[in-house]
Image: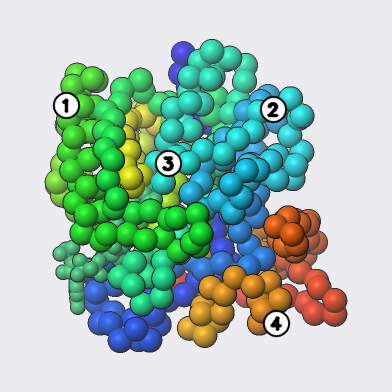
Amino acid sequence: MQIGIDSIAFSTSRYFLKLETLAKHREVDYAKYFAGIGQTRMSVFPLNEDIVTVAIDAAQKAISNVENKNDIDLLIFATESSFDLSKSAGIYVHRFLELKEDCRVFDLKQACYSATAALCMARSYVLANPNSKVLIIASDIVKYSPNTSGEPTQGGAAVAMVIATNPRILSIEPYYGVHTTDIMDFWRPIYKNEALFDSKLSVYNYLKSLEISFARYLKNSKLQSSDIDYVCYHAPFCKMARKANNLLFKNKSVDNSLIYNAIVGNSCSASLYICLISLLDNTNDDLKKKRVGFFSYGSGSVAEFFSGIISDNYKNMLSSEDNYRMLSDRIEISFSEYEGFSIDDFAYSFSLGKYENIGSVTLSRIENGQRTYETIRKNITGIRLERGNSVARIPQTASTSLSS
Ligand code: HMG
């Protein structure tokens, strides 16, 4: 039985900061960011946008391809940016998607690896329940402290995937290589919004874990490197994926898989799957029946190399133009706005002005630790967010190129 990704979509903030702007204010040579790290922009999130609102947007797009959403009886929300240690972020999404009540919902955490853990779990679940569909949402917003070496590698996004039998995008193969080791390369204590990290150790352990998990994958699958046509890597920054590729697959290009990550930044659990979307959207060659290798890495650390085969009619399932429009319609913010966005205070945030959500739902209030989400009205040019007499800025038409 073929099981895999039947529908996939992603979403990110309406706002981005150019790394050129960050470099100027941090007095760093911009070449370090675009050439050394491989990033040109990063998504930044106003306080009314969080892992839930962006997840709802991705999920609404992904389930628009599902004939009967009552077939979804499991929703797994993969995140490491959780704001609540008890309630699952997935429950808010379940409500806004109007999924049926007899649907299991829970969050899953293991740094950037969690969506791959969800995929593995979903595959087994569908194998046991072939009439069921599983909705996986990977949603993360990555924050490092100002003036740290991690600052240019912030970002955020959500990917939603429907896992089903006879998948229309990619069948997951039963081969994998896993490597788990207890290491402090990146962590976020519960009292902090910003992650802490050991740069050099994290890069070293990512590459070492790749070598080990790939060797295990080859042994388990009895395949050879040459049997793999394309590879997608977890991309905390694009240069990391390029370094990984140089280690194992020098003759294969990862350019197409990294186009979106270079301007979205690190989206942790979503990052690897944004690479897949970027590969599918931006590769002109026919990918049907091609084998794609995936390297998933979550600090702490768990790594997995696995593979899938692209479905025959995958092109019918792509939303390339919508993705391109979403990214090119984003709004650039100034450095002072960027600094304001990082202040975690609702009253202060609203005093900065009104910021748009990417999708149809906004976070409108936090009181007593309770988050209130509301549906907002849409108009033709974008989303109009009204609070009192003020109206949000309306998005301009695509005026920026994705590359600068
Ligand atoms: P750094 O110390 O700022 O930078 O760390 P660097 O000195 O290592 O330089 C980076 C590259 O820029 C080097 O190239 C330099 O030569 C080059 P390389 O030797 O690597 O090829 N460079 C320049 N190039 C051109 N012109 C210049 C110039 N100056 C330097 N003027 C780092 C950079 C990305 C590591 C840092 O931002 C960081 O620590 N980020 C956060 C941690 C991270 O992303 N680690 C990646 C692996 S761990 C992971 O993937 C998991 C994670 O996603 C979390 C999770 O699992 O949840 C992070």
Q: Which of marks 3 and 1 is in front?
A: 3
The crowding category of the residue bearing disc 2, from other C-alpha atoms within 10 Å (few below 14, some 14 to 19, many at least 20), is: some
Secondary structure beneath dot 4 equals helix
Q: Along the polypeptide, which appears first: circle 3 or circle 1?
A: 3
Vertical order, 296 against 268 (above or below): above
* Residue at left offset 48%, top offset 33%: 118
Q: What residue type is labelled 2?
A: Cys
The disc label shown at residue 103, or none? 2
Q: Which amino acid does label 4 sit on?
A: Ser
Residue carrying label 3: 110
* Residue at left offset 32%, top offset 59%: 197
Q: Say whether residue 20 is visible.
A: no
Q: Where is residue 283 shown, x and y percent of the image?
A: 36, 48
Mark 1 vs mark 2, CA separation in Å: 40 Å
**Residues at badges 3 and 1 in contact (C-beta under 8 Å)?**
no
Mark 4 vs mark 2, CA separation in Å: 39 Å
Q: Along the polypeptide, which appears first: circle 1 or circle 2?
A: 2
The answer to which image quadrant residue 252 occupies is: top left
The disc label shown at residue 351, or none? 4
Vertical order, 364 against 107 (above or below): below
